[in-house]
Image (spheres, grey):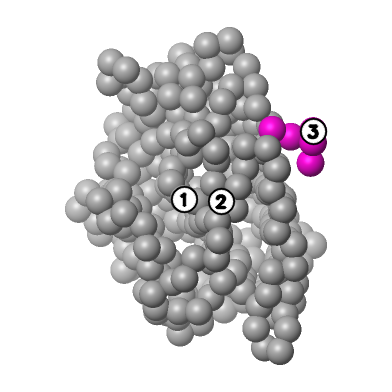
Amino acid sequence: MDKYDGYTELSFIPKNGRTLVDTLKYHGQSRVSARMQLNNEDTLCYFLIAMGGGLTEGEDYYTKISLAEDTRAIISTQAPTYIFKCDNHEITHQINEISVKKDAILEYLPDSLIPYRNARYRQDSEINVEKGGTLIYTDGLTSGWSPDGTEFSYEDIQLKTQIIYDGNLMYADNVILEPNVFKMQDLGFFDNYKNYDSLVVVNEKIDDAFVKELQDKFKQQDKVRVGISKLEGPGFVMRILGDNINFNRKVLMDCVDDIRGKLFGSPKLDLRKDPRFVY
């Protein structure tokens, strides 16, 4: 743990038909909340917390999450992850290592990244899901923040994600954003929008018909642009572009709620966050 500026480790095991925490560790600038008592369900839920409100240049963070067979957990963040300015051009790193065993369900739903002016950030996520396991995974990025209101003023961002299902690579995504090199609002990047979000869901019940139903339900949106694609395996990815982080989040969580209802008969997810931000 000492080699990282922030380290988090969470593992879950089954006992008598319930999910229990087996490991809960944190170190340095990282913290884990007490269990969050949800209004609508009894699923274990924890928030990841960055001390100081965000990540500072040159820091290295490591998050490890593992679910044993027949467990279920919801992991989110207390607030958006702010990437503070990197005046010395040093890169901030975040590594995520996630494991989901057979018949386990992980809902990993962090809030968006908000990079400050001149921020440099690398995120590397490797997720292993055993056959029969379920993953609901979100990611997002805003146009950033600067004192003068200039958009896309960060230096460079890389979000690399690999999902391996049943031993095979199902999903590989490598988002590289360099506003000093490319015009971020051009076609092929943010396409004249300001905020980007994605949702990846892996579950054996997801087939072509399942994805087609989602496409029909979510393709027509007034304030955001949505695309949904089937993966090479039992899963799909949703991409969202919009001008407001809350509009994006609303569509994202509507889809999460729809999936939770279809797959598990679960209620609408209420993470008890400030509705002025989330929606």
Local secondary structure at mark 2: strand
90 left or right of 274? right
> Is 240 in front, or is 134?
134
Q: Which residue is mark 3?
A: 3
Q: Amino acid at mark 3?
A: Lys
Answer few, some or many: residues within 10 Å of disc 3's Cα (few below 14, many 20 plus, some between 14 and 19).
few
Asked if disc 2 and disc 3 are in contact, CB closer than 8 Å, the reply is no
Can you name the residue that lies furthest to the top here?
88
Measured in 3D between alpha carbons, the distance from the residue under mark 2 to the one under mark 3, in whole angstroms, is 19 Å
Measured in 3D between alpha carbons, the distance from the residue under mark 3 to the one under mark 1, in whole angstroms, is 24 Å
Please name the residue shown 64% across and 66% down the image: 233
Asked if disc 1 and disc 2 are in contact, CB closer than 8 Å, the reply is yes
Q: Which residue is mark 2?
A: 48
Work out whether residue 231 can be spotted: yes
Please name the residue shown 55% across and 56% down the image: 33
Q: Amino acid at mark 1?
A: Gln
